[in-house]
Amino acid sequence: MSKIVCVLYDDPVDGYPPVYARDDIPTIREYPDGQTTPTPESIDFTPGELLGCVSGELGLRSFLESRGHTLVVTSDKEGPDSVLDRELGDADVVISQPFWPAYMTRERIERSPNLKLIITAGIGSDHTDLDAAIENGITVAEVTYSNSISVAEHVMMMILALVRNYLPAHQWVLDKGWNIADCVKRSYDLEGMHVGTVGAGRIGTAVLRRLKPFDVHLHYTDKHRLPAEVERELGLTFHPTPQEMVPQCDVVTVNAPLHKETEHLFDDELIGTMKRGAYLVNTARGKICDRDAVVRALESGQLAGYAGDVWYPQPAPADHPWRSMPNHGMTPHTSGTSLSAQTRYAAGTREILECWLDGRPIREEYLIVQGGALAGAGAHSYTAGSR
């Protein structure tokens, strides 16, 4: 029998929802590239429920306990006295979400002798020391594509919110005002702007497709160039490096994984090459942008706005400067955990567990590390020895 430790974010402050805003959510059976959505043998939740918090338990308890396994669910993940650290010693599986990551450091991995599987309920496994996982024979998996479109939609929302100055305008309504000039003094049309993405994987490409109808000029940079037919279809301009792309853009969106080459990529130097008054949107990982460089750029006016859904560390402390810097549109890493996305990544987590517990192969596209090496999506996104 296995012990599964699941680290999830806290319940809503007013309690677990007795009812929801909608009665159902659309059924999505496959992603744009034809990959099917998760296919567990069954689920023990209603699609559209709040599954990513402690009380939601990713809908796993009945399934696991009916098979005799032990499930520990907690939000307490920091420090040697945390529930996570107390439970790791005999844990076989650790599950967490990128929005509330269980940072699986080398130290934690090496004092968890039973640990065999680390699952990201969602996408992005940079909170796990992949080299340590490789060296210790641990399988790392994530629910690839489960919330990629969710994040792409969030990127679109943030771009429009910044360029159209939506948040300050909404604040005037909340404050009972009608100050039109104040609302529009920083408001522009997105039409005709040059917009570029750092990273053109599933999320980056989905963003580009959603931007196309806005009649903008589209740019991208990625270590894997897109097929020529996609470039023609979307009217894309390819740049070999971010350094070559960002000076051309009015808006830059970051949709790349965090690794050695991208950590603190957007520092004072790179931001300094951007157009004055450009906008930067980062829903990838907080450490891709240098924290203080972003603050300085907003205060000086080099950046007209910064919107991000990702921080370092997570959760961000109350005094994190991104909470109070000017002209920002930060959210607390919610882009990939909409109720729709939770349905998919909870089902995907169960699919991975079903395969692992039954000794069946885990889908190749879900794998990050297996058999002492990068595998599946991990071999495409990460480089061994880079963390």
Image (tube, helix red, strand yellow):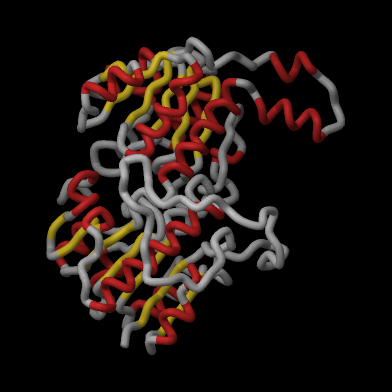
How many dots with numbers? 0
Q: Residue at x 37, y 27 (%)?
A: 197
Q: Is residue 346 above or below residue 80?
A: above
Residue 150 is left or right of residue 143, and the answer is right
Residue at left offset 40%, top offset 35%: 290
Q: Is residue 8 above or below residue 267?
A: below
Would residue 310 be found to the left or right of residue 325 on screen? left
Q: Is 177 on the left-hand or right-hand side of 387?
A: right
Q: Pick the residue in front: 304 or 121.
A: 121
Foreground residue, 201 or 24?
24
- Residue 254 place in picture, x, y as percent: 39, 33
Residue 126 showing in the rendered view: yes
Can residue 103 be seen in this snapshot? no
- For residue 267, side relative to residue 21 (left or right): left
Q: Considering depth in this image, is 154 or 182 the residue closer to the camera?
A: 154
Q: Which corner quadrant of the image does residue 275 belong to?
A: top left
Does residue 173 sit above or below 22 in this rendering?
A: above
**How far from the left and from the top, in percent, is residue 198?**
33, 29
Q: Examine the image and state in which quarter residue 246 appears.
A: top left
Residue furthest top as drawn: 192
**Quarter that holds the N terminus:** bottom left
In the image, is residue 369 above or below residue 113? above
Residue 15, position as x, y percentages in the image: 69, 67
Q: Give the residue displayed 28% in from the left and 78% down from the top.
A: 357
Which is nearer the eye, 213 or 128?
A: 213
Picture coordinates of residue 62, whole percent (x, y)? 48, 81
Picture quarter containing residue 78?
bottom left
Instruction: Write the residue at 26% across / 73% down.
Output: 356
